[in-house]
Amino acid sequence: MLPCLALVASASLWAAPPAIELKDDRGVSVQLAQPPQRIISLLPSLTESICAMGGCARLVGVDRYSTWPVSVQALPHLGGLDDANIEGIVALRPDVVLLAKSARATPRLEQLGLKVVALEPRSYADVQRVLGKIGVVLQVPEAQGAARIWRQIDAEVSAAAQSLPARVRNARVYYEVNRAPYAASESSFIGETLSRLGARNVVPASLGPFPKLNPEYVVRANPDLIMIGDRNFEGLAQRPGWERIRAVREDRVCRFSAAESDVMVRPGPRMGEAARLMARCLQERAP
């Protein structure tokens, strides 16, 4: 009996880890035979979240916009949402590819037999959910991964809000994410941070998280303060009618550097830092 028991004990010690199963933001059930050791991330916020959970060493490739932490800059960069380098991805033999739900590469990658997890964080609730799913992929216990990171984000946003004087509250803010213009509405994670800081977003939730606006809409909204990245700032005052906007007229425009803008538009572990940047803007520029 003893030799048999020894064999059973030995087999249990060397048993393969249980399979991982999760449902991604498409509603697709994805199964992984074991915790992935070769991961590709094609969205900067996902890259940052993976690294915040201690998974940076498992990354073998990232999208062209992933720049933080600095270590990922040395990895192969594999394009973006619309032009992912399929051949390059396949050549890296990933166990799983994490990307945005809107990425065009998903069907082709799946046809080639790769495991794909599509995640789309747009609101605070989305960020919490996505952190949880990344934790499942990495097999990091929730208390040490997703829950820990979310508590830190929440505490940092609260601290940023508490640092602001009452005089800046209720400032009417327009946040431009990209030219066209695309804005961050009340329902986006950026809009939710502004709300927690006591600001009022001139773009309502009813338009969706990141709506494309008619420039005249912003003129009519007449915000007290504009937040915009350096990449989109050029020519702002020359847009038709924008000289009438209070924020432009009174020079109440916060112009964020490229590095600061990256922090602010990525729904992940640096959202607390983004809140501090917004709070600084409100402190310095709000009427």
Image (cartoon, helix red, strand yellow):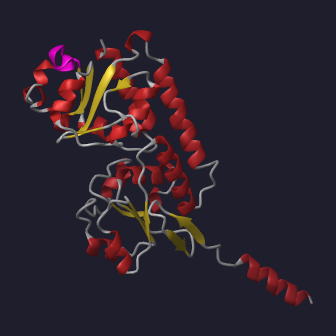
Q: Is residue 246 visible?
A: yes
Q: Does any portion of residue 273 appear in the rendered image?
A: no
248 and 265: which is toward the camera: 248
Residue 55 lies left or right of residue 60; in this view the side is right
Q: Quadrant of the N terminus?
A: bottom right
Residue 66: % across, % down: 32, 52
Q: Please provide percent x and percent y for residue 270.
A: 43, 39
Judge whether 14 appears above or below 70 on screen.
below
Q: Which residues are magenta?
A: 245-252
Residue lying at the far right in this picture: please name it: 1
In terms of image quadrants, where is residue 287?
Answer: top left
Point 69% across, 79% down: residue: 15
| Foreground residue among 200 and 69 | 200
Q: Residue at x 45, y 34 (%)?
A: 272
The percent position of residue 106, horizontal first and vertical second, equals 35, 69
What is the total number of numbered labels drawn onto the structure image? 0
Q: Does 165 sit above or below residue 281? A: above
Please state if 220 lies on the left or on the right of 106 as rendered: left
Residue at 75% in and 78% down: 12
| Left or right: 229, with 235 as reference point | right
Residue 162 versus residue 82 in the image, above or below: above
Nearest the camera: 286 or 142? 286
Q: Quadrant of residue 200?
A: top left
The residue at the far top in this view is: 167
Please give the name of the residue rendered at 81% of the width and 84% of the height, measured from the top-left corner. Answer: 8
In magenta segment, residue 85: no
Q: Residue 149's x, y, as percent?
A: 54, 43
